[in-house]
Amino acid sequence: QVTLKESGPTLVKPTETVTLTCSFSGFSLSTNTESVGWIRQPPGKALEWLALIYWDDDKRYSPSLKSRLIITKDTSKNQVVLTVTSMDPVDTATYYCAHFYGSGSFVDYWGQGILVTVSS
Amino acid sequence: QSVLTQPPSVSAAPGQKVTISCSGSFSNIGKNYVSWYQQIPGTAPKLLIHDNNKRPSGIPDRFSGSKSGTSATLGITGLQTGDEADYYCGTWDSSLNPVWVFGGGTKLTVL
């Protein structure tokens, strides 16, 4: 059974860098076709895809945020880390970690999400 | 503004049928499979439909999906109050570097 859980700071100040960790079980990111992504949702707004990392370390980023995002994986720890630089109040959102099925075809499992608030 | 366009809201009475549209372009819906997600307020989204019209195990057949050209549609029959939620479509956009895109979401109200 696939499970994912996000962790990290829930309150950050403007201009700071936030590091979010996705800890997962039920699959290995060293296995062919596996991928994990990050998706966020500002309060009351729509889902926004941020980044995706594949088993072979290939990475995809949202064009609008690419300069501020870094996604990495630690296969031995079953973790995926998302770093977002230069945080701004508009980045306040629930950040979800998600397992993409079959080389990224669709999201079949979601984490519970972590609300990150950006405020001074 | 989302690459995929959905109506902001739809509504129908219990027992009735509703459809939710998702309009895109050749580079996204036209070339790739569409999936649909249900998000009950306060919870994480849940996969409803993948590969345009396939239901994961455990999703009732009241939910259906279809795709034609650059548009996709989610159908829900026999509406229940528990279906009241936000619904999102999603797919890849292959215009430049492939990126995943979501629709803007549709709030379903079961009157």
Image (cartoon, helix red, strand yellow):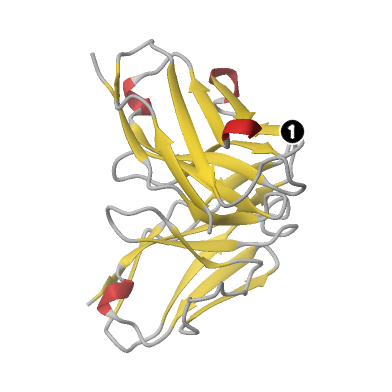
In the depicted structure, whether residue A111 falls above or below residue B14: above
Q: Is residue B3 visible?
A: no
Quadrant in which residue B96 is drawn: top right
Which amino acid does the dot numbered 1 rest on? Asp
Residue denoted by label 1:
A58
Q: Residue furthest front?
A: A76
Q: Residue furthest top?
A: A15
Q: Is B101 on the left-hand or right-hand side of B59?
A: right
* Image position, residue A20 (x, y; %): 45, 28
* Image position, residue B83 (x, y; %): 33, 73
* Image position, residue A27 (x, y; %): 62, 50
Quadrant in which residue B29 is drawn: bottom right
**Quadrant location of the C terminus of chain B?**
bottom left
What residue is at 54 percent from the left and 47 percent from the top?
A25
The number of discs equals 1
What residue is at 40 percent from the left and 84 percent from the top?
B17
Secondary structure of the residue carrying tag 1 is: loop
- Which of A14 and A1 lies nearest the eye of the viewer? A1
In the depicted structure, whether residue B97 falls above or below residue A90: below
Mark 1 packing: few (<14 Cα in 10 Å), some, or many (20+)?
Answer: few
- Which of B85 and A29 lies nearest the eye of the viewer? A29
Q: Is A25 on the left-hand or right-hand side of A5?
A: right
* Image position, residue B73 (x, y; %): 55, 71
Circle 1 marks a residue in which chain? A
Quadrant in which residue A45 is drawn: top left
What residue is at 58 percent from the left and 62 percent from the top?
B35
